[in-house]
Image: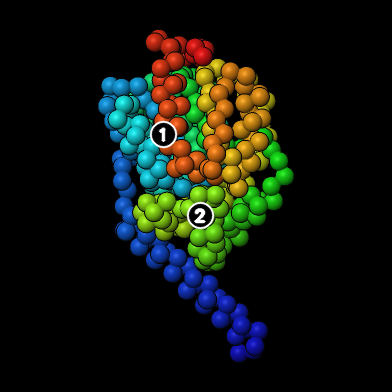
């Protein structure tokens, strides 16, 4: 056997070991962290969700950001706080947590909004206040723009609404590439992600420390599974194109909007929220002192108050596509 053949054999064996190891890691992660909610089949997609609070109360729908899952919003305290007064529905968005992400679709914010409009209809959720964090703000906006589903109000936290030059998002999109990305996700991507995860988490929560509940209870191993890394990489790749498309439609948002952003956000600049507030004159902007990207943890009471304000101003008999009172 030549030297070249020996090297190739060693490389191949190494890849096989990494692939089998990552498959085993995924199985172990799911056994350690089983689903915490229920499932609904909608439009060929199996969605994982939780429902809390009084089923007869006004409904609040929560969408998490890129790379996370339901547990993020639970650990922030938002789910429990809101469930004292409202019916709360929180989804794992496609590809995250335990929700599927079929490869037959391009999962833009609009595609996800189409899916969630159908899922919420199945769950008999009518005229909810929708809260989105980070990438979830784009899904919330896309849902509010739909003519076939009425939303009473939007609470948008730490969102990215206008395209800018962001090389970091493109660099994070490698695992989304066909074939090469698949190989990366089952070999080196989980290892690289595990290595950078502590720094990334500190950046997300800065300038505050990472909360003990998140540090001890968030299922990081689920976020490192190859299938979730694909979803996260795709959303990194889609972020700027989606943000380039939606501004043309922002004036079509006809429900009240509350915008929240941490002044110390090191991932998405607060100017994104300032610009959206200027574009939507009827919106209310709250820039939170000493808070970063995870403003949902830094100002949980304030965000819950923003939801409450929108529930109180919602029309008593809203019509599809109708304009809610400000």
The residue at the point 42 percent across, 27 percent down is 305
Q: Residues within 10 Å of mark 2 (few under 14, many from 20)?
A: some
Q: Residues within 10 Å of mark 1 (few under 14, many from 20)?
A: some
Mark closer to the observer (1, 2): 1
The residue at the point 31 percent across, 26 percent down is 85
Residue 262 against residue 231 in the figure, above or below: above
> Does the image show residue 158?
no
Q: At which x and y percent is residue 79?
A: 36, 37
Q: At which x and y percent is residue 130?
A: 45, 28
- Looking at this view, name the residue that lies furthest to the bottom: 1
Say what secondary structure mark 2 lies in. Answer: helix
Residue 212 against residue 164 in the figure, above or below: below
Rendered-image quadrant of the N terminus: bottom right
Instruction: Give whichever of 202, 243 is nearer the camera.
Output: 202
Residue 324 against residue 195 in the figure, above or below: above
Find the distance from the CA under tag 1 to the CA under tag 2: 22 Å
The residue at the point 66 percent across, 36 percent down is 271
- Looking at this view, name the residue that lies furthest to the top: 317
The residue pinned by badge 2 equals 201
Instruction: Give whichever of 201, 168 is nearer the camera.
Output: 201
For the residues labelled 1 and 2, say whether their Cβ atoms are less than 8 Å apart.
Answer: no
The residue pinned by badge 1 equals 301
Say what secondary structure mark 1 lies in. Answer: helix
The residue at the point 49 percent across, 12 percent down is 325
- Looking at this view, name the residue that lies furthest to the right: 165
Instruction: Give whichever of 240, 27 is nearer the camera.
Output: 240
Left or right side of 239 for 231: left
Q: At which x and y percent is residue 220?
A: 43, 56
Left or right side of 153 for 170: right
């Amino acid at each position: 056997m030549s030297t070249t053949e020996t090297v190739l054999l060693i490389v191949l064996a190494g890849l096989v070991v990494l692939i089998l190891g990552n498959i085993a890691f995924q199985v172990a992660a799911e056994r350690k962290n089983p689903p915490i909610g229920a499932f609904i089949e909608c439009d060929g997609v199996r969605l994982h969700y939780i429902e809390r609070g009084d089923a007869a109360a006004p409904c609040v729908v929560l969408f998490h950001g890129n790379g996370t899952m339901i547990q993020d919003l639970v650990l922030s305290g938002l789910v429990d706080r809101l469930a004292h007064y409202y019916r709360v529905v929180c989804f794992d968005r496609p590809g995250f947590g335990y929700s599927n992400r079929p490869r037959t679709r391009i999962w833009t914010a609009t595609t996800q909004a189409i899916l969630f409009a159908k899922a919420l209809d199945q769950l008999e959720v009518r005229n909810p206040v929708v809260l989105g964090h980070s990438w979830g703000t784009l899904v919330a906006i896309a849902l509010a723009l739909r003519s076939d589903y009425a939303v009473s109000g939007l609470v948008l936290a730490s969102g990215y609404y206008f395209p800018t030059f962001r090389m970091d998002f493109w660099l994070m999109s490698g695992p989304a590439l066909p074939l090469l990305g698949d190989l990366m996700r089952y070999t080196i991507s989980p290892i690289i992600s595990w290595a950078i995860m502590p720094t990334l988490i500190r950046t997300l929560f800065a300038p505050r420390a990472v909360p003990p509940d998140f540090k001890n209870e968030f299922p990081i191993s689920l976020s490192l599974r190859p299938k979730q890394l694909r979803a996260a990489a795709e959303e990194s790749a889609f972020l700027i194109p989606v943000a380039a498309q939606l501004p043309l439609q922002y004036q079509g948002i006809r429900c009240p909007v509350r915008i929240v952003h941490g002044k110390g956000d090191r991932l998405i600049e607060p100017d994104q929220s300032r610009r959206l507030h200027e574009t939507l004159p009827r919106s209310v902007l709250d820039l939170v002192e000493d808070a970063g990207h995870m403003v949902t943890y830094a100002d949980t009471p304030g965000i819950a108050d923003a939801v409450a304000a929108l529930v109180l101003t919602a029309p008593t008999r809203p019509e599809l596509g109708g304009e809610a009172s400000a």
